[in-house]
Amino acid sequence: QVQLVESGGGLVQAGGSLKLSCETSKFVLDYWNIGWFRQAPGKGREGIACISARDGSTEYFNSMKDRATMSRDMAKMTAYLEMHNLKPEDTAIYYCAIENKYLDCSGYEDQYTGWGQGTQVTVSS
């Protein structure tokens, strides 16, 4: 069973930064792309970024692409999402998820087959 555990969310003021973590296993990082998504109240799930299992390259998909950086630490078996200059509209539950490594990194949730429980990010104005 794939385990994905998000952490690092919280309450931050507009303009602030957060670094989210997605703890998993070496097996997952070797064989699955990792994506970050978010879901704001009353909205659908939105892709933010993805890191490829094949070569560690990253793709960014939404309005956060200039304010977010995704990375991974194979030794710590963790993927990260650093977010800067946060805005109130970034308030959402943030999820990490896995995608087949033989697919190109995608921002479409239908291509992801396993999800963490999410971590809440709240940005105050």
Image: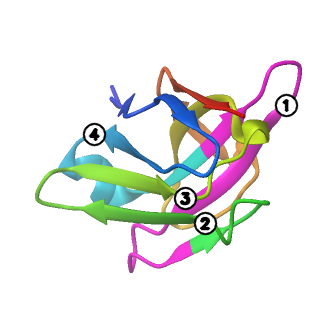
Dots 2 and 1: beta carbons under 8 Å?
Answer: no
Between circles 4 and 2, the one closer to the viewer is 4
Q: Distance between the residues labelled 4 and 2?
A: 20 Å
Residue 36 picture location, percent across and down: 56, 48
Residue 122 picture location, percent across and down: 61, 27
Residue 90 occupies quadrant: top right
Q: Dot 4 lies on which element?
A: loop
Residue 83 picture location, percent across and down: 53, 55
Between circles 3 and 1, the one closer to the viewer is 3
Q: Distance between the residues labelled 3 and 2?
A: 28 Å
Q: Reading the chain from its start, which is encountered first: label 4 or label 2? A: 4
Magenta residues (range) = 37-58
Q: Dot 3 lies on which element?
A: loop
> Which amino acid type is marked by label 1?
Gly
Q: Dot 2 surroundings within 10 Å: few (below 14), some, or many (20 or more)?
A: few
Considering only vertical position in the picture, is 1 above or below 106? above
Residue found at x 39% / y 80%: 55
Judge whether residue 104 can be spotted in this image.
no
Q: How far apart are marks 3 and 1 (CA)?
A: 22 Å
Magenta span contains residue 45? yes
Q: How many labels does the image show?
A: 4
Residue to which mark 4 is pinned: 24
Between circles 3 and 4, the one closer to the viewer is 3
Q: Dot 2 lies on which element?
A: loop
> Which amino acid type is marked by label 4?
Thr
Q: Reading the chain from its start, which is encountered first: label 3 or label 1? A: 1
Q: Distance between the residues labelled 1 and 4?
A: 25 Å
Q: Reading the chain from its start, which is encountered first: label 1 or label 4? A: 4
Considering only vertical position in the picture, is 93 above or below 54? above
Instruction: Specify whether 55 is left or right of 61.
Output: left
Residue to which mark 1 is pinned: 44
